[in-house]
Image (cartoon, rainbow, N blue to C red):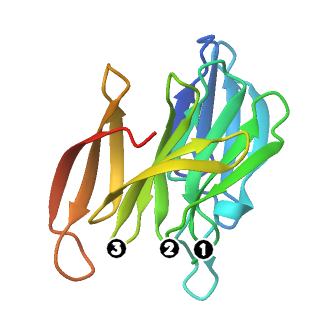
Amino acid sequence: PRLEFPAYGVALLPDGKQLVTADRQPQKPRLQMHDLASGKVLLSVDVPELSGYRRVEDIEWGGIRGLTVSPDGSQIVACGRNGYDGPACALLYETGTGRMRQKLSSDLKGGFYYGARFHPNGLLLTVGGDLAKGELRFWNADRAESKGVITSPGPATAFDIHPDGKRFAVASNVGKGSYPDSGLITLHESPV
């Protein structure tokens, strides 16, 4: 499908017949579910909670930074930041209706969640950070309850789950001042 605004996320549903996209429409980033065969938009959801639009500059500093779908296809997770200067957060939506089910907010005062993934044990993992710190957080998403966190010395931007399900590789960025100048990959044991 061709999107009206820049694309910042894509996720296939488990049935292989539908695709979810995330755009960076100013003031109201949008999730859309498309039928792969016809290209038809089946669902469109505005996500103004993740907007960081600044009218003075006419720039969208926020937007959806990461997107994933639950293994059973029932939930869409949109990652970003709550408003212009709020905490990193992930929003969970029902795939069938587009209704927001849950909002998961980081303890970090700024920054973004850049990605999320469901662990085989049912927990939702989110990765993110701000200038001087980052995290990989483990959530019971149904209760919006943090079950554990792995911290990093700079913004964590990506992660992967080891095949044993007990270890995690985390990519973070570190450096002096406000801009990271190098990357750091670390392997961690599960805190839960």
Q: Residue at x 69, y 16 (%)?
A: 38
Q: Furthest-front residue in view? A: 192
Q: Which amino acid type is marked by label 1?
A: Gly
Q: Which amino acid type is marked by label 3?
A: Leu
Query: Mark 1 and mark 2: span between their CA atoms?
Result: 6 Å
Q: Which amino acid type is marked by label 2?
A: Gly
- Circle 3 Cα neighbour tier, 10 Å, few/some/many (<14 / 14–19 / ≥20): some
Residue 136 image position (x, y, % from top left) = 41, 50
Which quadrant of the rendered structure holds the N terminus? top right
Mark number displayed over residue 170: none
- Circle 2 Cα neighbour tier, 10 Å, few/some/many (<14 / 14–19 / ≥20): many
Which numbered disc flags the more N-terminal residue, 2 or 3? 2
Residue position for label 3: 131
Q: Residue at x 15, y 68 (%)?
A: 181
- Tell me, yes or no, whether the two marked residues, 2 and 3, touch with CB atoms within 8 Å: yes
- Tell me, yes or no, whether the two marked residues, 1 and 2, touch with CB atoms within 8 Å: yes
**Vertical relation: 14 (above or below) 92:** above
Query: Mark 1 and mark 3: span between their CA atoms?
Result: 14 Å
* Left or right for 109, reference 184: right
- Circle 1 Cα neighbour tier, 10 Å, few/some/many (<14 / 14–19 / ≥20): some
Query: Mark 2 and mark 3: span between their CA atoms?
Result: 9 Å
Residue position for label 1: 86
Residue 3 in sight in this render? no
Residue position for label 2: 110
